[in-house]
Structure formats: structure tokens, C-alpha cells
Amino acid sequence: MSTAPAKKLKARPAPKAPAKRAARKKPAAGAAKKANVTAPGPAARKARTAVRARTASPAPASPGIVATLAGISSAAVTKATGHGWNYWLRALDKAGAAKLPHREIVSVLYDKLGLKKSWWVQMVTVGYEQARGLRKLNETTGGFVATVSRTVAVPISALFAAWEEGRRGDWLPDALEVRRATKNKSMRITWPDGSGVDVNFYDKGGSKTVVAIEQGKLPDEGAVAAVKQLWGSTLDRLKFTLEGKG
């Protein structure tokens, strides 16, 4: 009996090992956070802007307007000279006045800057010197000056008459010499210590008058304070005497 030849079995190929997956790189910490952050909405942007505004350095303040120097308002200087204090300070700075003595500043104002009103030339010079630290408050070329004023509820004629010889004893016991007087307007007085006193009267209408005292040639700021106190109490007595108030 014949037998059939045996079939050759084909060898099966060995199974392939599974391919290794490429290792994933871990994202950097900052990148991971960045990937998870969504774009800020309008409310968030508004909040951030507010925080920046609060923490930002403040802008430098713009230079302020000088209101008063040497006891004179910028409005009064503008009315008399055509320019306010800020203009004159800048103009004199530009002319190098901060390094000049009083007389030369006067010359700069008159000759170079065209201010031809003598009284105002002096006042602008004094104001400039005070603003730039060249002169102390209440200081003039002739020494220190004290000024005091009061408003009295009487007509100007009654207030002026109270300063005339023989009428001052009720409120001004100190002896003084009246060098010159213009009725209902002004008096020039020499005080017992030799200092000069200017008294000016201003009709305010409605039976009200201002009396303004200016005493000059004082040695220092301490003397200014003492004179202001003296004239303040003296004018209060005058006011009490004329108004009859108790």
C-alpha cells in the first residue's frame, strides 16, 4: 500500500514585537501653565488696568500758579503791569536775576523787560527776591516791614479825625510825630524809636473804612512779630472806641 508524501509545513514567522511608542516630552512648567490659561475676558482686563493705575508712579505735578508775593496778588500785578507773577519770575530767571543784587534786578526790569512803572518795578523785584530766597518775608532793602489793618464801621472822615492831634489819647497813648498828613487819605508818622509809620485810609462804602499800618526799618523778624502784635491791639482799641462796642 503506497503512502502519500508528507506535506512540508511552512514555518510561521515569529510575531513582531510591538513598536515602542515615542516618549512624550513633558512640557515645561511655564508652557503648561500658558497652555491652560485662557485669554482674559473684558472684566479681567478692566481689573488689571485698574491695578496698574493704582500701582503706577504718579505723574509729576505741573508747576502751580503763584498767587501772591510781597503781599500783592498776581491779579493786581497783571492789572498794573500786563503780566502776572509767573511771567515775571520766568522772565527774570531767564535774564539771570537770581545772581544779581537788588539794584541790578531793578535795572533788568526797567531796561530789558520794559517795566517802566517805578513803584511796580520795586514791588516785582521784592516779590522775585522773596520767591527765589534772596529776601526773607517782610524784608525790604531798608530793613523789615510790619503791616496791620482793620476795618472800622465808621465813615472815613471820622476815622481820620481820630488820628488827629488831641484825639489820639483815648486809644494811642504813645507819643508820636506826624510828619505829613493828607486829609481822609494818609499820614506819615515817626514812632518814638525813630522808625517810620505809614497810615493809609480806604473808604469801603456803607460807613466802613479800612485803616492800614505799615511800619518799616525794623531790625529782624522778631521785631516784625512784636510790632504786629502792638498795632493789632492798638487798632482793636481804636475800633472799640469809635464803634462803641462793649
Image (cartoon, helix red, strand yellow):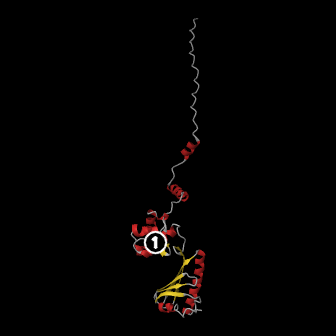
Residue situated in front as seen by the camera: 121 or 237: 121
Using the rendered image of the protein, determine whether residue 66 is visible from the camera's viewpoint. no
Task: Tell me if 83 is positioned left or right of 53 in this view.
Answer: left
Position in image of residue 198 (x %, y %):
51, 83
Residue situated in front as seen by the camera: 148 or 110: 110
Q: Quadrant of the C terminus?
A: bottom right
The mark tally for this picture is 1
Using the rendered image of the protein, determine whether residue 99 is visible from the camera's viewpoint. yes
Q: Quadrant of the N terminus?
A: top right
At label 1, counting other C-alpha atoms closer than 10 Å, the crowd grade (few under 14, some 14-19, many 20 or more) is many
Q: Residue furthest top?
A: 1
At a point 58% along the width and 80% down the height, the residue shown is 227
| Image position of 242 with respect to 213: above or below | below
Q: Quadrant of residue 224?
A: bottom right
Position in image of residue 22 (x %, y %):
56, 31
Position in image of residue 219 (x %, y %):
58, 75
Question: Which type of secondary structure does the marked residue at label 1 adopt?
Answer: helix
Q: Which residue is mark 1?
A: 124
Q: Amino acid at mark 1?
A: Val
Q: Quadrant of residue 32?
A: top right
At a point 57% along the width and 16% down the height, the residue shown is 11
| Image position of 243 with respect to 226: above or below | below
